[in-house]
Amino acid sequence: MIIEVQLEGDDTARRYRVAREDGEVCLRRLDDDGDGETVCLDWRTPEPRVYSLLIEGKSYDVHIDENSADEEVLEVHLLSRVIRSRASDARKRRIVKDGAGPDGPVQIVAPMPGRVVKILTAEGTAVTRGDGIIVLEAMKMENELKAPRDGIVVSVLVEEGQGVEGGTLLATIE
Amino acid sequence: MAKIKRILVANRGEIAVRIIRACRDLGIEAVAVYSDADREALHVRYASRAYRLGPAPAADSYLRIDRLLEIAAESGADAVHPGYGFLAENADFARAAVAAGLTFIGPAPEVMESVGDKNRARQIALAAGAPTVPGSPEPVEDADTARSIAAELGYPVMLKAVAGGGGKGMRRVDDPADIESSLRSASSEANSAFGDGRVYIEKAILNPRHVEIQILCDEHGNRIHLGERECSLQRRHQKVVEESPSPILSDDLRERMGVAALAIAAQAGYSNAGTVEFLLDEQRDFYFIEVNARLQVEHAVTEMVTGIDLVAAQIAVAEGQPLPWRQEDISLKGAAIECRIYAEDPANGFSPCPGLVEGLRVPGGPGIRDDSALYEGYDVPIYYDPMISKLVAWGHDRSTALARMRRALQEYKVVGIATTIPLFQRIIEDPAFIAGDFDTGYLDELLQDGVLGPDHDRHDEIDDVAAIAAALHTFLREEARAFQIHNGSRSPWKLAGRNSGLRDFSR
């Protein structure tokens, strides 16, 4: 599996080949900055969302929060620092980029209760992956819900200003 | 002198837990109250009795004086502790509790009322001979009066709401031309925030520090102070970090401020624990600002340096016991610092982040105290103050306390919700903070370039490990997903949840 990790503030993403080798998770950095060596990780998940990593004798206690609206957006907490990143399976990303993803309709669902602040695309608009569809305000924070793949916005089921429950279907892309 | 046997704790969250702990230490039964949002809260489970108040909104539960008194009667409580927030400084509640035959653990209702009114409190301070900020004795009605008072005081001046607090209805005016518009906007802001548009004028204290004195008074005229708390580190007029002693107070200044605080307490007829707040200007001259007629959030730093349990002391005073200490018995030992940890996302404009605490690891070890109501599996409700923990570190000197706090912040893991822990990690590394060189405006300035700062220095090793962890996390998620799809939706992995599934997977 090729995983791309874009750290906030970095110009380019890091690319890793990650695979199981004899049950261990082994990882090799593919981009120019890496030295191309394969490293097998000594890792445990002793607590929910917490990874204990031992790398070359050094111990790192890492906790990772996934964004509730977008699982690829990660907050990595490590040694008093919070590093924001986007990490994704490059293959999945390529499928979507090529427009060769699954053809069924994709539903945009409210990830949490909130209020629709803005509708960014009208019905019938063609969108590409990553385009903002709807801005949802929840707990005083605005979240832009994005198109998970290319397509046409075939329906928008809410209005600006409307309050919605978590799980409410907001729009459909085909 | 009636021994208190059962205390109704008219509060929730970490302060309710704090009070219940004192009750348990003293062999007193604690009666908890809860809203529908708090049935599973720790304070309910730590209390010996617990009663439902009403629906989740505070107005339907923790602010219902009638329900609290019903529950007091039903539970057989003989005293009530209001904590802080909610009804803690509501004289009507104190009066109603006393009328119902309860011992109110706090000052007398009429004293609470007089010190709670800014103008009356100022008169009390003046009568006690304590220095106050020069200003208008009465609220100002029109711009002309305001302008002439301001000219006498000298610019800059502050316009402040009579009913004010938290920076609302407050304006700094540097120029006579701005008086009229500032007066209008301060007054209308005060009116909408407090239902009282009256505004008065004070001379502005430039780059002030906020230093307050903890007082403890019994009902027999004995009064002592327990030193100061430095509370200058504030975000938008809200205290964020507090410590005792203040890094800038000399013994002589502490003595003078303590004497002034006790003179005000004597003048007001104050009993029980309270706090007298002062501003310090750049010449280290101090000015009275207000009395807080209750226990304060930051009381724990005083407890750490004096060794006195303030809640236990409050209960003893309410029972009518004389203070067991004289002023000369009190000394500040070492240094203590407190971080108010909130369920707020500092990276997102401090928006509140209630929700499920999926994982929790609380720091411990030498000198660390965590006053909190969190547990793993706790769902932080959206209805109340987002403060979830007060983390306190003590050391034999300030630098040891700071080192312990730095270590404790690193140990503290709250998984599932955002907290302000990263903010404190920034503050604790800040050179001006470490040097003790900050005023009440310092933190807001520091945060202008974002909570993590511009030189939240990129660190190659940390970046590398973070990226590896992110890659590992993503790999495991996708692997588990493929496994689930492959094995159909009835897979026990899916039922068992991702993490436990992964753990087995790794072996």
Image (cartoon, coloured by chain):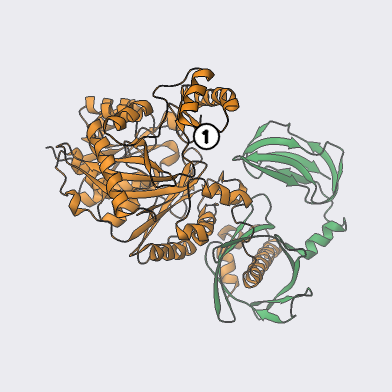
Q: Nearer the viewer, residue B496 or B202?
A: B202
Chain A rendered in what hue? Answer: green
For the question of whether residue A61 can be seen, the reply is yes
Residue B263 in the image: above or below residue B345: above
Q: Which residue was labeled with disc 1?
A: B156
Pinpoint the chain carrying mark 1: B
Q: Please tell me whether mark 1 sits on a helix, a strand or a loop.
A: loop
The residue depicted at 41 percent of the width and 65 percent of the height is: B399
Image location (x, y in percent) of residue B259: 25, 43
At label 1, the amino acid type is Pro
Residue at the image point whose x is 72% and y is 40% from the top? A135
Q: Nearer the viewer, residue B218 or B316?
A: B218
Q: Quadrant of residue B69?
A: top left
The vertical placement of B113 against A133, above or below, is above
Residue A107, x across and y down, in percent: 75, 45
Image x and y of residue B503, in percent: 56, 69
